[in-house]
Image: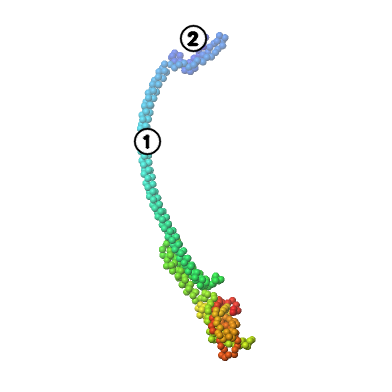
Amino acid sequence: MSRDSSDDVIESRPGGDAGSGTPYRGVRSLAAILPNGRIVWLRVDESLAPVRALGNLGQLADNTARWHRASVQSQSEAIERLSRTIASDTERTLDARIARTGATRRRIVASNRRLDRKLATAREKHLAGVEKQLRIERESVARLGRRDLWDKLLVLSSLPLFAAYGQPGAPLGANNVALLLTLLVFLVGDQIVDALFGSGDKSPYPVRDTDAWTYLAPAANLLAGWWLLSDRQHERFVAGRTVIPVDRFEPEVNPLLPLELLYRYTGEIDLLKIVALDHQDDFRTFAGVPAVATISSIEFSDVGKVNDARMEGLTAKVTGGTLTITLTVVATNTGADPVPPVLDALEVTWMVDTEEPSTSASIT
């Protein structure tokens, strides 16, 4: 609605000083009467600010600008001081970091050097230990080789002892046990003594080296076996050849054939001189000792040949440790007196079992 139509417009203004030239703040309301008589209420926007308000606003803007410039100046100076402080702090921080880094680096270098020295020392110690252990192992292998050689020689030295004094068929025989114990004494006796009584020093070698005991053990084993068993009977069978005198005989007429004359030639062999000393007392008491004899050579005399002499029988018997061999020769009875011998030479071979017989039956 136009403000020039004052006649048709009724302006309603709030109370107040209308002559001051300053309009009331707020929204003005107008009422308009239309030609048809209808009243319409209109709302008018707020009026513009007056000059004084604009002057105050300008002064306020100037003051604000001055304060703003002062604040900006102060902020600039503060920022400059902060920048200088930050730069100084940064420089000090960098210097401190560099110093700490240098100190850390020096500590690391010193620690690495100490570690290198320790590692070098440990390495040298380890290498020395390895070299020492290798020397010990090489020496141990050499000692094992030497001991193995001499142990084999010791075992070989027992073979003739077992062959001479051993008891075949009786593994637990007295001779076999004695020889085995003797062998064990010389084989591990020194080690047993060391284990029981110990040695003065602690040797790093697991094997003892050869010593005088080792070198003397084979010969000592032979001597010990011989000393222990030399007086024992180690040969089951004893044998020999004996010449029976032909000038000593016992003639006897054959009771079955009176025309024949029996010649008995007897020879005695003292077996106690042949068997071992420790076996003599036992052998003397044996009964039914097996013994055999055979003629190794015989030579008939001219009389024997003329009288048709022939061998009738040969017996061998052991009694009280004496072997008695009896040869019976049959010849024609000529009735001559004295009775002439029918043999010029007689030699027999005999063999006797020295082991205690299981039966009392004699073998001829």
Residue at 42% across / 18% down in the picture? 53
Name the residue type under label 1: Thr
Placement of 127 over or under 65, stated as above or below: below
Residue 4 circle label: 2
Can you give x and y, in whole percent of width and height, for residue 339 in the image?
57, 89
Name the residue type under label 2: Asp
296 with respect to 95 (left or right): right
Which secondary structure lies at badge 2?
loop
Residue 90 circle label: 1
Mark nearer the N terminus (1 vs 2): 2
Q: Residues within 10 Å of mark 1 (few under 14, many from 20)?
A: few
Placement of 23 over or under 241, stated as above or below: above
Can you give x and y, in whole percent of width and height, for residue 18 in the image?
45, 14
Can you give x and y, in whole percent of width and height, for residue 210 in the image?
43, 65
Q: Residues within 10 Å of mark 2 (few under 14, many from 20)?
A: few
Cα distance, mark 1 to mark 2? Answer: 75 Å
Q: Say which of 134 and 362 sits in front.
A: 362
Can you give x and y, in whole percent of width and height, for residue 250 in the image?
57, 87
Q: Quadrant of residue 256?
A: bottom right
Q: Say which of 45 and 295 sits in front.
A: 295
Name of the residue lying farthest toward the right: 256
Residue at 38% across / 26% down in the picture? 72
Query: From this viewpoint, is residue 145 visible?
Result: yes
Q: Quadrant of residue 170?
A: bottom right
Placement of 131 over or under 190, stated as above or below: above
Q: Say which of 353 and 224 sits in front.
A: 353
